[in-house]
Amino acid sequence: MRIIGPDELVFGVDNVGACGSFLADYGLIGDGNGRFAALDNTAITVRDKQEPSLPAPMKTASMLRQTIWGVEDQATLDQIEAELSRDRPVAKSADGTLACRDDSGFEIAFRVTRRTKLDLPAELINSPGAKPGRGTNVVGANEDAEARPRSLSHIVYFVPDMDKMANFYIERLGFVITDKFTNTGPFLRPQANDDHHVLFMIQTPEYMQGIEHLAFHMQGPTELMLAGSRMVKKGYESFWGPGRHKFGSNWFWYFNSPLGTHVEYDADMDKHDGDWVERETPMTKDAAQMFLFENVEKWAPGGGPPPAQK
Amino acid sequence: MTSEPLFLCRVDDIGEGGSIGVAPDHRGRDRVLLVRQGQAIYGYINNCPHYDRAPLGWKKDAFLSGDQTRIMCAAHGALFTITDGLCELGPCLGQRLTPVALVITECEVFGLDIPEFAYGRSTQQSSGAAA
């Protein structure tokens, strides 16, 4: 099945204004109607939680109302409709979007992707022994660089039964396991996407079910650092990072958000195909990160760190 | 053992029905959150019971749900009662925020026995954020 990845996530929130400010500061581009898009038009949509058009809320604290998956073409949509209609109601809206629930009770939808194909430069670096990434006299440290999220990268759920959840996406929708944290959950990618993961899950008690975090891809580690530093400077609460993960290799920086979920910047994630053999390891802090920094106030050698605030 | 009361803020620094983060550590992280409701002020350690060293706010001084009736952890949306810090919904259901004993004079707020801590996820397992 030619599923590409998450196209859009829809939230029902109690503070639309705060969520809008957060997502705009995070770097997404608002359309004035609650939809905040990355450069490739993948997006987060926030609506007031009372809005009747929203899919039903979960009984937990999770504010995520729907995960919309983007697929390559109409043939894939037809295939998904035939497959999932075998054992559940699948609603079809005027524009052809299919909506139903997965086996864990999450509201999901499928549509021909609205993402655009990006043609943008990667982070350019100079490395001894390699052809310079940047031309002579081109400066790498640009404080005024834009730093906008390029694409909705992945979504992570808290689920009461990781096997039930994973098997639905694997057996019914053709997702592939790339790696696994024992007793936590697998990292999954769909067939039309070679990213290490677009979907991950963490097994938790039932009352915790919901979204754990979402992430967007940035150009590279430098842009991730720049965007995250700007968030900290604006007073946002860094939760974890910046650092680099082991599984997936992606750089990460997580922030708390008024959407009641962590919102992550990621960069430079591994790519995989069918030749890849999944790895498995127990979930520990050493398995989760290769290294971790913490943002502190700037200082220069000789100046010393800032004095402790009293 | 009670230490010297630590000055946290002036009563007027907390907007009516609002929240504020106080007692920054050496990294500038606020160790305590305060919520004001009328004449009453409630103080809690800024750490969600869900994980160790997980700050609750999503932005400086932003610790409440949209309707300001609950303390909200912006990590996963957990909601706590303002008066006793009990989690009513979310990953730490039934657990409580750690209260901070306050001494409130006519116009100033002091806290007692506020632990020193520095956030840093390098020494703690983060069981819920792995991808």
Image (tube, coloured by chain):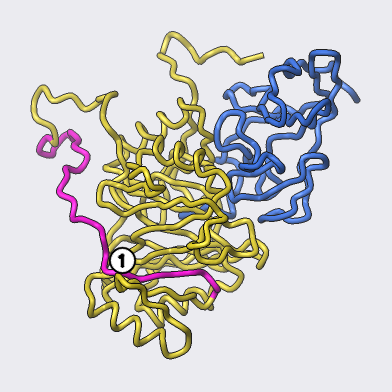
Chain colours: A yellow, B blue
| Residue B19 occupies quadrant | top right
Residue A70 spot, x, y in % from top left: 31, 66
Q: For the C terminus of chain A, give its image quadrant.
A: top right
Residue assigned mark 1: A70
Residue A52 spot, x, y in % from top left: 52, 61
Kindly identify the residue that appears in the image at 46 percent across and 79 percent down: A168
Q: Secondary structure at mark 1?
A: strand
Kindly identify the residue that appears in the image at 44 percent across and 38 percent down: A242
Give left or right: position of A13 versus A41.
right
Farthest top residue in view:
A303
Residue A165 spot, x, y in % from top left: 51, 74
Please check the rendered image and state whether residue A306 is part of the magenta-colored stretch, yes or no.
no
Residue A171 spot, x, y in % from top left: 41, 82
Kindly identify the residue that appears in the image at 36 percent across and 73 percent down: A93
Q: Chain of mark 1?
A: A
Query: Can residue A287 be seen here?
Result: no
Give left or right: position of B100 versus B90.
right
Q: Nearer the viewer, residue A122 or B81?
A: B81
Q: Which residues are magenta?
A: A104-132
Compared with residue A210, is residue B44 higher up or lower down, i.e. above or below? above
Please check the rendered image and state whether residue A109 is part of the magenta-colored stretch, yes or no.
yes
Query: Can residue B126 be seen here?
Result: yes
